[in-house]
Image (cartoon, helix red, strand yellow):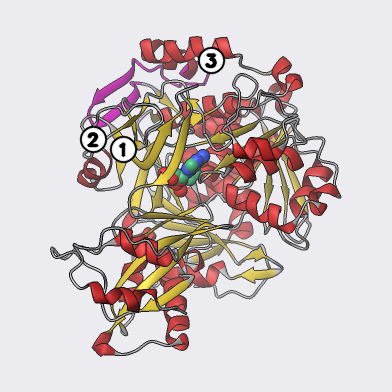
Amino acid sequence: MTESNNIESILSSDVTIEPPEAFRAKARTSLESYQEKYQRSLDDPQGFWGDIARELHWFTPFEQVVQWDPPFARWFDGGTTNICYNAVDRHAEGARANKAAIIWEGEPGDTRTLTWRELHREVQRFANVLRRYGVEKGDRIAIYMPMVPEAAIAMLACARLGAIHSVVFGGFSANALRDRILDAGAKVVLTADGAWRRGSVLPLKEAVDAAVTECPCVEHVVVLRRTGNDVNMTEGRDVWWHEAEQQVELTCPAEPVEAEHPLFILYTSGTTGKPKGVLHTTGGYMVGTYLTSREVFDLRDDDLYWCTADVGWVTGHSYIVYGPLLNGATIFMYEGAPNWPEVDRFWDMIERWKISILYTAPTAVRAFMKWGDQWPAKHDLSSLRLLGSVGEPINPEAWLWYYRVIGGERCPIVDTWWQTETGAIMLTTLPGAHHMRPGYAGLPFYGVDAAVVDEQGNPVPDGTGGLLVIRRPWPSMLRTVYGDDQRYKDTYWSKIEGCYFAGDGAVRNAADGYFEVLGRIDDVLNVSGHRLGTMEIESALVSHPAVAEAAVVGRPDDLKGEAVVAFVILEGGRTGDADLAAELKAHVANEIGAIAKPEEIRFTGALPKTRSGKIMRRLLRKIAAGDEDFGDTTTLEDPSIIAQLTAKGF
Ligand code: PRX
């Protein structure tokens, strides 16, 4: 099937699209080389990963590629390295020294370019600032920053010293930030006065002040001046970034760390009320993000690569900062909103900067589609050569729009499935090598032994839905949940014997073995590509004095993927109204962040429970979606409550 197919016939039948010929002719990987390398990666993982790892710098060579003591893996044992050294120092001398490492545009339109040499200098200088405030190898540092080059510099400076960063997305509230700082025991917090968002200032320092008052572990807060708004500086605790930088030297050698030395903690939602600190370590994560970035994005020195994620999410860690920089690629970073000052901001920047690779989320693609073809049509997007999608399943309609309107049917699309826990891309096509199948992520990446199984762990036939599992360790896998090995075992390695269970459902296509990821089968929501636990939102709701009980489900949403719907029982038989609903929504925003705000609150006198007392979420999901076919409700304790639950909410 070729690109000339009309969209209607593509949408109505399950078809494939061959990679555009011009791309294929120059692509890094061919179908044959993928097959050969994939086979080797499974037959000889030690040889395969050892060779890749040796392309990077080790202060002391590793002795063993992988040691697997299920469910604990150690990669590149005996070796010492430094990911910052590999991502920065290696490119700061020689041919790339004066090439751009980071090209950045602020929301107000200010711009900045850092060459590799400049990035090297800035990272060293900031590492010295951290040292000056007592940061040592193994210390935890919280980063709560806008999308500015300093966010990447801060992460790299931590890694340079062997300090462990925990980046908290700037959209999280002070309370959520406090919980994450406390769980990690962070010693220093890095922030800014504010961040620009749709022309106004998001007061980051204010949130840090509120959080840190309750965090005795925090000794210092380093504050970048970005928006220029007034902030309170606490004497002895808070320091200005630019002032601190004037007091330190420009050179700071990278600290050699063991391959398994922790690199970062990133909190993510799970099925309980408490977010998990996913822990990644140095060597394996470095090798995994290095190889996936190069192969999946077909990276070249003359590319301008733009991943639109925020550094607060794993995509920002692996595919804005570490992976591309490890490859010496030039990255583009943008601070603000896609619809500021107009909805063509992205296309305007692609045209002005000649961006060649764009990696974004389906929710963004759907918003662009809704805003209309006239916006991208105003711009010359011919610099683009490759498109990527991540964060949630991309519906074929959005895929095809992206392919046709943004990519001009010239750019392959890589639909990359992975997770905070996997560290790097796990399922994808390789551009130029593989045909594409809209709606399907594709095939396992090198070293990934993926399967679709039933609840007992038996592979299901192709074309049948099941659980997506990974059957062997891979370099960039999480090592544990920070401070909680038991939770790591229980969450990821207990559902299916001997397998990592990802939490997603999937189906494999019989024709080509492509995986279609169907979404979460557990109580985790995906709202605009942001991962939220239903329990986390429920805990936030019941922490409000008026709420006795709450159940949260996702409702399919054309734009966001899923929208949050909360069913709420009030204390003392109180009845709810629009004002209380608004108050509860604000309460959730305050507890977690605006991203978790329920779209709708339905007050009810009871929740549908089975006779054994379990909330029937399946039923709530149907009710929230307006589906009137409730299926079997005979196990329901009190069938009469359905009328209350279906009443309109606020
Ligand atoms: O449900 C899957 C979905 O996002 C989840 C992981 O979320 P998070 O850890 O926040 O990481 C997001 C960025 C890697 C997965 O369990 N997901 C991610 N990418 C895809 C996807 N679902 C379908 N297709 C994808 N390409």
Q: Quadrant of the N terminus?
A: top right
Is the CB of mark 3 within 8 Å of ligand 1? no
Callout 3: SS = helix
**SS state under label 1:** strand
Q: What is the crowding at mark 3: few (fewer than 14 residues within 10 Å), some, or many (at least 20)? A: some
Name the disc covering residue 496, or none: 2
- 339 up-or-down from 329: above or below: below
Residue at screen point 39% across, 56% down: 187
- Say if residue 331 shows up in the picture: no
Label 3 vs 2, first from the N-terminus: 3
Please tell me whether mark 2 sits on a helix, a strand or a loop: loop
Which range is magenta? Answer: 53-78
Q: Which residue is mark 3?
A: 34
Mark 3 → mark 2, Cα distance in angstroms: 29 Å
* Badge 2 residue CB within 8 Å of ligand 1: no
3D distance between C-alphas at marks 1 and 2: 7 Å
